[in-house]
Amino acid sequence: MKRITIAKGDGIGPEIMDATLKILTAANAPIEWDEVEIGEQVYLSGNTTGIPNEAWDTIRRNKIFLKAPITTPQGKGYKSLNVTLRKTLGLFANVRPCNSFAPYIATKHPDMDVVIVRENEEDLYAGIEHRQTDEVYQCLKLITRPGCEKIVRYAFEYAKLYNRKKVSCFVKDNIMKLTDGLFHKVFKEIAVEYPEIESDSWIVDIAAAKIANEPELFDVVVLPNLYGDIVSDITAEISGSVGLAGSSNIGEECSMFEAIHGSAPLIAGKNIANPSGLLRGAIMMLNHLGEQEVAMKIKNAWSCAIEEGIHTADIYKEGTSKRLVNTMDFADAVIERLGRKPKHLPEVAYDTNAKITIKKYVRRQPQAKQLVGVDVFIDWKGANADDLAAHLGKANGDLELKMITNRGVKVWPQGFEETFCTDHWRCRFEKSEGTEKVFNQSVVDLLQKIGVEQLDAIKTENLYKFDGELGYSLGQGQ
């Protein structure tokens, strides 16, 4: 008997959790649970994280967390609890299977069967933002080799375990050559270890268009956090309904399972919500626990109810559906069909020995790191880059001004007067001629000289080479 943690959440959460637990109990799932309170009421009690310490203790002790949707109050600096849970518990992989249930649930893509494997901890979701000038705000995009290796390897292991034929990578490395470039590079490195699985790579914008129009082209898709958030919702929606999709959040120690939809407060308490998303998340939880027999029994019973037209209001359609049911009636319909197999929808047959082994990241030997310059970001209200360059030229020493950009466009030397400039200037200093080596003190000396010129240096980014390879992007014209 495995002990798990549950949270009934907010809005429709308690209703769909009760329905899900009723099905799990009827199917004799070998689990017991401890309930914790998280979400809106915890936020409103003054806890800005939405989760009390005792809940953390229970989740960490039991390792497995089945969570209903929660509500994050707007305003007042409340943090997203979903993001907090994923990052704090190291839940690096978000897995969302999205397949159609045609003809019982309307979709333009009756043959789609796609699994989105989304990196869950980093990228722009690190949430590191600053207001740097009167006009400019910044959000840092963080992509790490450990993060890339863990998520890409998990995608291939998932494909191997469930007999998937192909893994596709979506990135934007034609623009973000270092960050998305690293994700793509690691994908290609790891793909070599799985020669039996086809692999390909796509630029994310055309890939998102393709997956919306021809999802049959894809099997397993792995991608960074922000793209994964967007593409997984697109994929769930075109499969027929976001309300039917569940997801798993997998970590090395703990894992969390949930529906992908929100708390839907407008229909809360009416007993009309569809519990399918949370139930399918619970089935993924059983898969994760190795309880494949129970998972198969519930999933097949659910498919029987769907193909027999027993539908909640969100998917009910005259002419296709046979009976409109509420939340608990749908749960009862699934329970009545336990032990049966669908006639038309695919019957699931999981490998009873199936389990993914998650390898811990092994840090590589560090590369030789050489400081070669610095980008200094200046808050300056002038409009002429030549004037700014004249001030900065007085600060030249071991480091010499080579270029000024504004919003990534080179404006000095040889800038165009048509280029619109804000008050945020990136000023690149590199090793001057005759200087053998740049030290950290060289950067400090430069900043002191810039201060003498009464210029506001709001940020610096040191420029390094790693084993002789540039660790920064070249500016336009370099």
Image (cartoon, helix red, strand yellow):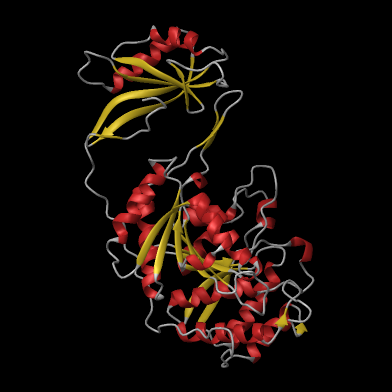
Give the position of the C terminus as an image quadrant.
top left
Q: Is residue 187 left or right of residue 23?
A: left
The one nearer the camera, 142 or 164, is: 164
User: Splitting the image into 4 quarters, where does residue 398 fall?
Assistant: top left
Residue in the picture at 36% in, 68% down: 157
User: Splitting the image into 4 quarters, where does residue 22 fall?
Assistant: bottom right
x and y, in percent, of residue 75 in the image? 69, 43
x and y, in percent, of residue 301 in the image? 59, 87
x and y, in percent, of residue 327 in the image? 72, 77
**Is residue 249 among what the camera can see?**
yes
x and y, in percent, of residue 50 in the image? 62, 54
**Is residue 53 among what the camera can see?**
no
Residue in the picture at 68% in, 87% down: 308
Residue in the picture at 73% in, 83% down: 329
Q: Is residue 410 left or right of residue 263?
A: left
The one nearer the camera, 160 or 289, is: 160
Residue in the picture at 78% in, 69% down: 269
Q: In this view, does 234 lie to the left or right of 95?
A: right
Q: In this view, does 132 lie above or below 5?
A: above
